[in-house]
Amino acid sequence: MVDTDPVAAPGLVTCCRALGGLPVGAVLPRHPDRRFLASLEDRGLPRFGRSVEVITLPQRARRVPTPAIAEGVWRPARTENAVNAFVIRHPEATFLVDPGICVDVVDRAVAELPRLLRLAVTPPRDVVDIRQALHLAGIDAADIDFALPTHLHWDHVAGLLDLPGLPAYLHRLEHSWAMDGPVAPQGGVRAAVRNRPVTLYDLDGPPILTFARSHDLFGDRSVILVDLPGHTPGSVGLLVQTSSGPTLLAGDAVWSRIQIDRLRQKASYPGLLADADRDAAWETVHRLYAIRDRLAIIPSHES
Ligand SMILES: [Zn+2]
């Protein structure tokens, strides 16, 4: 463990709700909010500027029972649960999205998690760390200009521990949630963010598709960050145009596209422990469901 800050732990009631909700949600999934869905206004895709290249860096993949991913979904019986980072090549910069795994990640990051969450998310010892993943993809770590995590959970930033000095672009709201105050939120790894150049941004741009706010990263409409609140307060998605069409890297707004296709929330264990605001996260799933046919949506834990 590298971070000396105390970390928030869920109370007994929350733990019981998470565990007890798993079998309940498996047979009685949360009802979609049809009124909220009907109220969503789709402002359409932006007029993209330049295309970018998105390269997936697989760091771990396993298959887990689908009812442990999405409430009330039993077919297929098992679903991919991966840890992926992404490299985006833009004409002006090459950057890393969600560098989640460092060397010895279990000791350096997972050890900070509450015990009940550790049981669900501890990766195998042979998980691929971010520098190894870059090497396997033929990418020199020295060519990476900055990192841009979709949110500040351990499995999206712990790789930064092995990339000292790499600048990071962070949503100001998310940075405040993870870094302010005497107690780090569960899942946050403050040491990954500290002691590096950080540029904070706000979602200061107009609504796009069904998302309330946006931010044009390069000012050329090639990488547009959109608001995906709920999983964490400042979670964002990256909306880009690739050679295969419009694509949204959706972070942990959903763990699987099954949640979008079937309009289901995350299973309560571990979802209730992982989502900061369960209701806001559920609204975000609706926002993704409403545009599911307009673009490719790639959750970080599926590719
Ligand atoms: Zn997360």
Image (cartoon, grey):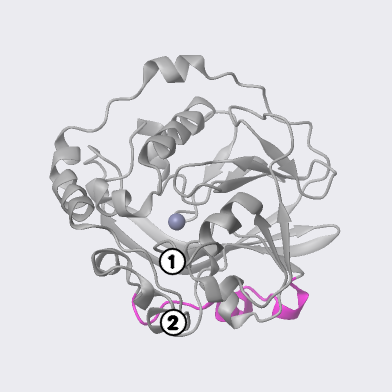
* 122 relative position to 218: left or right: left
Q: Position of residue 252 (x, y in %)?
A: 46, 51
Q: Quadrant of residue 48?
A: top right
Q: Which quadrant of the frame does ligand 1 lie within?
A: bottom left
Query: Which label sits on residue 108?
Result: 2
Q: Neighbour class for label 1 at 10 Å: few (<14), some, many (≥20)?
A: some
Q: Nearer the viewer, residue 226 or 73?
A: 226
Q: Is residue 77 visible?
A: no
Q: Quick check: is 137 in the magenta stretch?
A: yes
Q: Position of residue 215 (x, y in %)?
A: 73, 42
Task: Determine whether 226 is above or below 163 in the image.
Answer: above
* 17 relative position to 271: left or right: left
Mark 1 vs mark 2, CA separation in Å = 18 Å
Q: Position of residue 20 (x, y in %)?
A: 13, 47
Task: Determine whether 47 is above or below 96 in the image.
Answer: above
**Which residue is found at the position 17% from the left and 32% from the top?**
28
Q: Quadrant of residue 264?
A: top left
- Give the labeled residue for mark 1: 183
**Which range is magenta?**
124-144
The image shows a total of numbered marks equal to 2
Q: Position of residue 143 (x, y in %)?
A: 77, 75
Q: Amino acid at mark 1?
A: Val
Q: Amino acid at mark 2?
A: Arg
**Which residue is found at the position 57% from the left and 68% from the top?**
99
Q: Find numbered disc 2 in the image and state the secondary structure of the residue it sits on.
A: helix
Q: Find numbered disc 1 in the image and state the secondary structure of the residue it sits on.
A: loop
Circles 1 and 2, Cβ within 8 Å, touching? The answer is no
**Which residue is found at the position 44% from the left and 31% from the top?**
283
